[in-house]
Image (tube, rainbow, N blue to C red):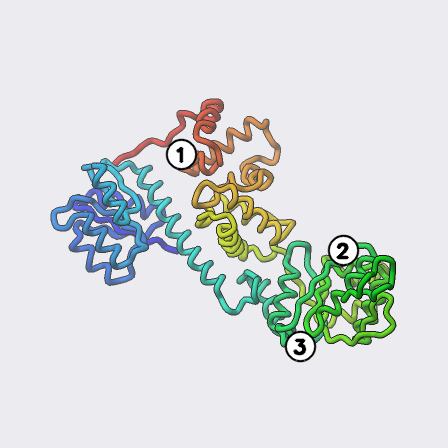
Amino acid sequence: MKMRIAVIDDEPIVGHRLKKILEKDGYEVESFTSAESFFPRLARPGFHLVFTDLRMPDIDGMTVLERIKKINEETEIIIMTGYVSISTVIEAIKKGAYHYIAKPIKLDEIRMVTKNAVEKICLRSENRSLREALTRRDSPAGIVGTSPAIQNVFALIRKVAAVDCNVLIQGKSGTGKELVARAVHSLSPRRAAPFVSFNCGGFTEELIGNELFGHEKGSFTGATATKIGLIESGAGGTVFLDEIGEMPASMQVKLLHVIQEKRILRVGGVKPVRLDIRIIAATNRDLKEEVKAGHFREDLFYRLNVVTIQIPPLAERRDDVPLLISHFIEKYNQAFGKKVKGVAPATLAILMSYDFPGNVRELKNIIERAVALADDDRLQPGDLPPDIQKLELDSLVDSEPDTLEEIEKRYIAAVLKKSNYNKNIAAKVLGLPRTTLWRKLKKHGLDNVTEPPDSI
């Protein structure tokens, strides 16, 4: 969004110079020589950021600060003065000032403070939008996203939920197939009945048969009591069969019989049990290809595939990444007792450029780790797994790589430049302790690299 900035200073040359600098950086700026001329302007669309001199002939900067905060608490205010005192600084910060700048004002300091304040304003606005999106009532329970790709999935979930037919969910691992199955169940007329889930992969044929179909007492050694199978326990509700493509051929035959006859026969049983269930199956395989290859029964495929819901991979719904990050930060703040407010722009840039082969599950694990390790109120690049941090390094390396030392030097120099040569900020972006950064700067001959400190 376009940042609106006000500059209030009784020295016209200061206001003029600041206006010129900030407009050059792309901000919308208005300059005022007194608080009296500034206040009527507050009746119109307000400012995101206000620079105000502390000592002015008519009304002082502290009064300006208090009045602005009464009108809009989210406006950030930066106090400027040639008379610095610790007590005044503390008072201004307590009253809500964002920063305190001593005169004569250095241009690089103005740019850095403005950039940081704008970053805070944008982050707050994004978080508000994300919170609103997270609480929207049109998203099926548990699924997060506003991108067109996931909205198409939501629309199909709502349609198929009302129709009591079998559903096949297809999508890569980690895309949230079980969440979609649960959403279909929760919106269906069966929502008051059980939702039973079973993963068909990784189990022996005997175990799958026992778990799904149950057994009668005495049907085999150790069967000391009758056991109700998962399919039967889902009576009246929904049975979710995950990784259906992994089901052995003999079990496919039994499942087909259950779907066709709407009856189940426990292992060792002689009397079929009537069933009233809905089956939702999921797979990360292309079942049509599995049928062609003879690995999956064609008749069972068509019984399950009444309606197909295809879940897009996260790489095809990148617009949802910030929203998912916010969702997972909130989740793990509660789990770990943390107070992380969001992600640093550098961190978000890395995550937005990542392909997420593990999809939403991988992003969830990344944010869980980052929140657990975070020392800041925003997730920094150093909180990410090392292989993902490397993405930022790779973006700064030529196609023909140099030595590791040359790559490190170029990377640190690029971060220094991006942080306007503020070494404290550079250390945070790099995820390094300040002492380690000092050593690396000296090693690479970057310890004296600074930008000329122009002054007003």
Residue 112 vs residue 199, the one in the foreground = 199
> Which dot marks residue 201?
2
Q: Position of residue 83 (x, y in %)?
A: 18, 37
Residue 122 vs residue 330, the one in the foreground = 330
Disc 2 on helix, strand or loop?
loop
Disc 1 on helix, strand or loop?
helix
The CA span between labels 2 and 1 is 50 Å
* Observer able to see residue 215: yes
- Mark nearer the viewer, 1 or 3: 3
Q: Is residue 80 left or right of residue 246?
A: left
Q: Position of residue 400 (x, y in %)?
A: 61, 33
> Which dot marks residue 424?
1
Query: Which residue is denoted by mark 3 in the rendering?
Result: 163
Tell me the quadrant of the picture where the N terminus can be found: bottom left
Task: Characterize the local packing of mark 3: few (<14), some (14-19) or many (20 or more) Cα atoms within 10 angstroms.
Answer: few
At label 2, the amino acid type is Gly
Q: Position of residue 187 (x, y in %)?
A: 60, 72
Q: Earlier in the sequence, mark 2 or mark 1?
A: 2
| Above-or-below relation of 417 to 153 | above
Q: Earlier in the sequence, mark 1 or mark 3?
A: 3
* Residue in the image at 51% along x and 41% along y: 373
Tell me the quadrant of the picture where the C terminus can be found: top left
Residue 421 vs residue 233, the one in the foreground = 233
* Observer able to see residue 19: no
Q: Position of residue 47 (x, y in %)?
A: 29, 55
- Mark nearer the viewer, 2 or 1: 2
Q: Quadrant of residue 111?
A: top left
Q: Is residue 452 left or right of residue 147?
A: left
At label 3, the amino acid type is Val
Name, please, the residue furthest toward the left. Answer: 57
The CA span between labels 3 and 2 is 28 Å
